[in-house]
Image (cartoon, coloured by chain):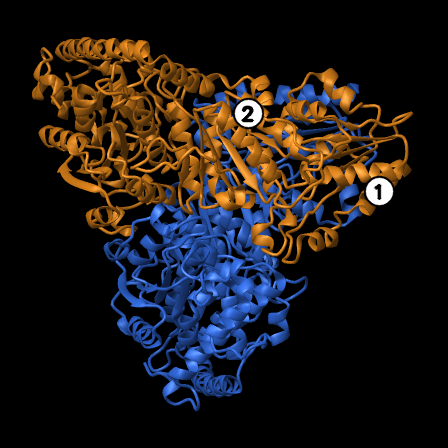
Chain colours: A orange, B blue
Amino acid sequence: MKLIRSYCPGMNLDLLQKAANQARGLAMDAVHDCASGHLGLPLGCAEIGAVLFGDLLNICPSQPRWLNRDRFILSAGHGSMFLYGWLHLSGFNIGIEDIKNFRRKGSITPGHPEFRDTEGVECTTGPLGQGIANAVGFALSARRAAARFNRPGMDIFTQHVFCLTGDGCLQEGVARESLALAAVLKLDNLILIYDSNDITLDAPAERTQLTDPRAVYEALGWDVRQIDGHDIRAIESAVEAAKNAKNGKPQLIIAKTVIGKGIPGIEGTTKGHGEGGAKLQEEAHANWGIPAGERYYVSEDVRTAFANLKAQREKDFNAWNAMYEQWRRAYPELAEELDAGINACSCGVNPADSDKAIPPFPQDYGDATRSAGAVAINAIAKANPCFLTTSADLYSSNKNYLSGAGDFSAETPEGRNFWFGIREHAMAAICNGIAYDGLFRVSAATFCVFVDYMRASIRVAALSGLPVTYILTHDSVAVGEDGPTHQPVETISGLRVIPNLDVIRPADPEETAGAWMAAMQRADGPTALILTRQKVATLNGIPVETRREGVLKGAYIARKEQGALKAIILASGSELELALKAAEKTGEGIRVVSMPSFCRFDAQPAEYRESVLPSSCMRRVSVEAGVTDLWWKYLGCQGEAVGINRFGFSAPGTQVLEELGMNVDNVVAAVHKVLAK
Amino acid sequence: MKLIRSYCPGMNLDLLQKAANQARGLAMDAVHDCASGHLGLPLGCAEIGAVLFGDLLNICPSQPRWLNRDRFILSAGHGSMFLYGWLHLSGFNIGIEDIKNFRRKGSITPGHPEFRDTEGVECTTGPLGQGIANAVGFALSARRAAARFNRPGMDIFTQHVFCLTGDGCLQEGVARESLALAAVLKLDNLILIYDSNDITLDAPAERTQLTDPRAVYEALGWDVRQIDGHDIRAIESAVEAAKNAKNGKPQLIIAKTVIGKGIPGIEGTTKGHGEGGAKLQEEAHANWGIPAGERYYVSEDVRTAFANLKAQREKDFNAWNAMYEQWRRAYPELAEELDAGINACSCGVNPADSDKAIPPFPQDYGDATRSAGAVAINAIAKANPCFLTTSADLYSSNKNYLSGAGDFSAETPEGRNFWFGIREHAMAAICNGIAYDGLFRVSAATFCVFVDYMRASIRVAALSGLPVTYILTHDSVAVGEDGPTHQPVETISGLRVIPNLDVIRPADPEETAGAWMAAMQRADGPTALILTRQKVATLNGIPVETRREGVLKGAYIARKEQGALKAIILASGSELELALKAAEKTGEGIRVVSMPSFCRFDAQPAEYRESVLPSSCMRRVSVEAGVTDLWWKYLGCQGEAVGINRFGFSAPGTQVLEELGMNVDNVVAAVHKVLAK
């Protein structure tokens, strides 16, 4: 690897140090002016920023989504002014006015980095630890892309993934899970830079962690270097060595830094973390060689050197691009697959194709929706070579294994089944990383109740609009003997309140096919598929098309009333069968509405919603084996909710359901009750 | 330390091995008969069970809640038949009929160990990793109890905490956080036994973890021993050494075992994990020396030896108890404090006392509810010496620090402020451990939005009925500049659906005092207090008593309409002020209901609920800066919900609130809308 600065006019060690100090100044001035934000990292890591953005990152600011760019993830997202400052200096689409608008309404420089808001920001970070797992996802994506698409003499994917993190991220469990996994998967394309400043928000770090972490990371299987994080040459050497290591070990650079460096009396203390030091703006400026009275200062020589660097990077990009065009001509089918992968992530898959991909189930199928899900996911994977899946040690229970698609490992990096161990949180956050990278379409499976472990990452997926699919099986107390720790009752409702997360709980195999179609349609957010452990009836009384397309609309009439409409029973998932049976028993005027997805239904035009749930009929009963709170939105105050507003217990599933009132008689009684109102 | 078997008639190495094999038989027969459950651990760890329950555990089966018992936590809760088998053999209140009823409805031997269901079960386990964190909580509790209550020559607390875990638990992030913390806090009273069988549910463990973990644990600061987990003498030596180490390091025993040991063709494979091997019952029985055709077999000599052991343990207990009575007489004030601690955990604190403890706030207080919370928690801590608090590096933001109460550390184990680092999940699970132990009353704080990291542990607290209090500040988009990753919108609703979790979002300082009173009242479940970052009005128009006692009831009339009731505005937290202002603007017939806690309101008698929300008035408007879904329960279909059904954005908090429609005008418009219906 060569240093760009060795052939980039005006770029040299002194210039990089000057740029580092001016980046400090940008952070200081932005935080000062909005009176909030975090100075600790931008000041502590300025030399690291200089080496990466001023030299060693293989990026092209005019091509921010270049396929082969090095990815840079700021896991310590609160240090966002680090990122904005360096993106600005290196020529991304962030002007000095944007820096001045830091943390202001409508700016592209929000308090924490937000995916889609800002060119050069690879992902949304802020919730601690997530970025490290995201970086593992980017590294997996890079590894698989290289294996799948590179050809002799045409290495179109050679990128490295950089992640800058502090103690805050590294103490988090999701980070610990990810570090372990990165070593097992031998991700030597991953370079983690640890801003080790011995300070956390509240206290010196030694209060909550051991003082010498090096041995831990080495034992975990990482290649570790420790350096002075303010020594530009040392940083360069360490990054070069890490890039060149290729020894099957993920790379860790422990950079000893001074938090808030340059603010007199505050650097190196807990006060250096936040915005407190901004009041010492002038004194700090002087320490950094910024002329007195200047604000948002960048010297001419720094501007010029970074402009030269940007031009040089464009040349590097063009050289790659020529090779890439050649590759596209030489391997048109691979190019098509790559395009499809990128499009599948950004635009979704044509639902008609998914429909064709998943043939109708036999009328006597009679298996659990998790089993129907296995059929659907395998059909989708066959039709979409970019489709991947992952498991937290539950392939055998969740049934999301892609037959014949191979297992991902260091030795078999083309595999499409990822084994993540018993690490649900890392799984979800790594899937976010894969989805941010946007080359592959990814799904993740675990027991429904354990989605709680992943919730923080699911929230980020919803916020970032990532089309990840969660496969959550064993969806009610019907789980049975494993007892209340394994029986969701509130879990599905807990997911339904997350904005931009589609939650779908299909009733039978055809609805399951429809649910997968719905998930694959989405380009702008995640979908949670809620599937049964137990066998369910195949509802042949409803046409296949009605069931599949009904799911896409969130709710549909599963049984039309005969004669005048007297009451409506609403149900989701395995309880739709109860609703249908209860309707049979209660007479002619009873409509049954299958409601697999609240949010998809809410997004339908008012006329459709009115056609399914006419406001003239407020005699309504809901049936779902879980807490009832959210159903009231559709029931109104005259309605009745049949559900389970308590935790379950250990016994065979049918007994638990019966004991907790999930039976036809109770639904019938509820219908009679609303009819009598 | 002495081996009990050296002076317990009939108990010897051969007998222990025999007992181990018969414990295997119990597990096999129970799993066989209910056709579900997990054989892997009960068979793989039988010799470990024999050493602990048949000798080295300092327990007294006839005194299952003995204060000074060694605690045993089965983190790998799916291996529940290990626990039931050994509790039965060692003489706890579990008969052979209970073993036969394994996983059956109403049994005391549910699929996973459940706290309160079974004597000798210290905590509910099953969600992986939680038990390890719980054990850290028990160890902290033990450490603080010893420091606080032991006196020269009267060590009433000397217990060790044992935890048995497999790879499933150890791979989890919550376990990793806890392991790190245990070393920092120098918990050498914690002994973790690692059932290392190289197999996970789905695959050989080497697929997802490094094969030699020893160096990792040593680097983390643990004292590590590795043994053959089927060698009774080796287990004994390791446990003795761990108990005697007292070297400031938590103790790890890596026991290499064979999963499902004794089932021909299945032991040592992934098939050994679950119930699959139960079909080879007879062959396995033969391997274990169980007479052909016998079921649930325990030989006479084993019965006799364990009966002798139980008697011996009673003698040991009696010796301790004599010392304990002497201690109570010598230190009556300490005894009172200990009793109060135990009672505060099991029965709650008299709310009248809390009320007295927290004096009324000044009328011009005008600060955030998190600041009012700081006043309340310090008052409570002053009145309750058993009250502890914990933080995941946010004392300075959450403001739950107990002034003058000291910081817990190895050197200052009487401290009542616990510093857990940036480890929210471990914090919550460790608090569960402290609450299970029941000597202290504990609380935990973080930013509201990051409660997602803790959700799996909060669920277990709710399920187990643990009176933990969560202090969740920065409760809406009013957080402002930090942006959507830090702004809860769905978070509070996500908590409200968890059964047996009280969620309280107070509106002002007096409601905050009431919320703390409500939390302290609870003996049978956790409470989440939702507090603002921003300053809120002190609502002096409502009497102090009304505000405080109103919170206890979940909802109350904050502003009574004048004349005929025309419409009701419901609000929680900081939005109550908006509701009151909107009512002023909309005329005489408008009632305002403050609704800090849905679940507490739902638990009130029907008459009270009707008096607050008369069913005759369905013109209702809700106001809350968050998703609106749950409010429909109280609004009915004619109502209007003013809320935020999307993620927020980065800008000053007041601007975000305004942009997202959280203002008086919008509430007024909504009232006019319902009035026009």
> Chain for mark 1?
A
**Residue B247, picture quadrant:** bottom left
- Residue B627 seen in render: yes
Q: Quarter holding the C terminus of chain A? A: top right
**Residue A541 relative to residue B324: left or right:** right
Residue A542 picture location, percent across and down: 76, 28
* Residue shown at the point (24%, 8%) measured from the top left: A322
Which residue occupies 50% across, 47% down?
Answer: B456
Horizontal arrangement in the rendering, residue B358 relative to residue A610 (left or right) = left
- Mark number displayed over residue B515: none
Q: Mark 1, residues whose alpha carbon is within 10 Å: few (<14), some, or many (≥20)?
A: many
Q: Nearer the viewer, mark 1 or mark 2?
A: 1
Q: Nearer the viewer, residue A579 or B674?
A: A579
Residue B408 lies in quadrant? bottom left
- Which is nearer the eye, A69 or B376? A69
Quickly name the residue at label 1: A668
- Give amino acid for label 2: Arg
C-alpha span from label 1 to label 2 = 37 Å
Can residue B120 be seen here? The reply is: no
Q: x%, y% of residue B490?
A: 55, 33
Residue placed under numbered mark 2 in the picture: B646
**Res A181 quadrant in image:** top left
Q: Nearer the viewer, residue A257 or B240?
A: B240
